[in-house]
Amino acid sequence: MAQATLKGNPITLVGTQLKAGDKAPDFTVNKNLLETASLADYAGKIKLISVVPSLDTGVCDAQTRRFNEEAAKLGDNVIVLTISVDLPMAQARWCGAAGIDKVVTLSDYKNHSFGKAYGVLIEELRLLMRSIFVIDANDTIQYVEYLGEMTEHPNYEAAIDAVKKLV
């Protein structure tokens, strides 16, 4: 289990941290209350996975809006997924209010499958730690950013550059 912080206070991340070159682990998350999605649903696509604790916070809002803007420029072979533990209905409501239409939001609320597999489940809060994963069309991880402090922004440019190298 890795250590990270929330406003300087230690939090514990559950699972194994991944690195570039690792095979992307499978996961099961919710598209809505009844329908699930897994890594296989995006087979053959380049995947930028933006992980946020909750869409209803300032940094998560900004992160999702930024990747929504970028998604339109990346082409049809790239899918941008935002994963949080927000309920699917809350994600849909937030996206509608924010005009988010290029990013696919997925919820890890039910069994934390993604959080455990990718080493981003916060043990104390049952939220996901802010992080970025770029996975190629063959499901190999090409870029990873685990943030050490939950309230910081990811390196947007590095993540976008990692995707562009694969397009």
Image (cartoon, rainbow, N blue to C red):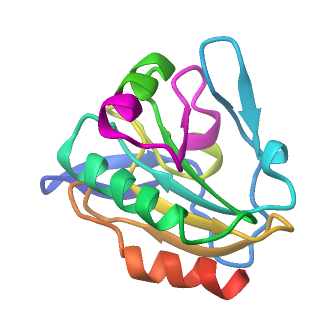
Residue drawn at (60%, 52%) of the image: 118
Q: Is residue 150 left or right of residue 34?
A: left
Residues 163 and 6: in front is 163
Residue drawn at (65%, 46%) of the image: 117
Residues 137 and 99: in front is 99
The magenta stretch is 94-115
Is residue 126 in sight in this rendering? no
Residue drawn at (61%, 24%) of the image: 111
Residue 76, image x, y percentages: 72, 63
Quick check: 159 above or below 28? below
Is 112 magenta? The answer is: yes
Residue furthest to the top: 34
Task: Give the number of marks.
Answer: 0
Is residue 122 in sight in this rendering? yes
In the rendered image, the quadrant that contains the C terminus is bottom right
Residue 93, image x, y percentages: 38, 23
Quick check: 132 above or below 162? above
Q: In this view, does 133 lie to the left or right of 7?
A: right
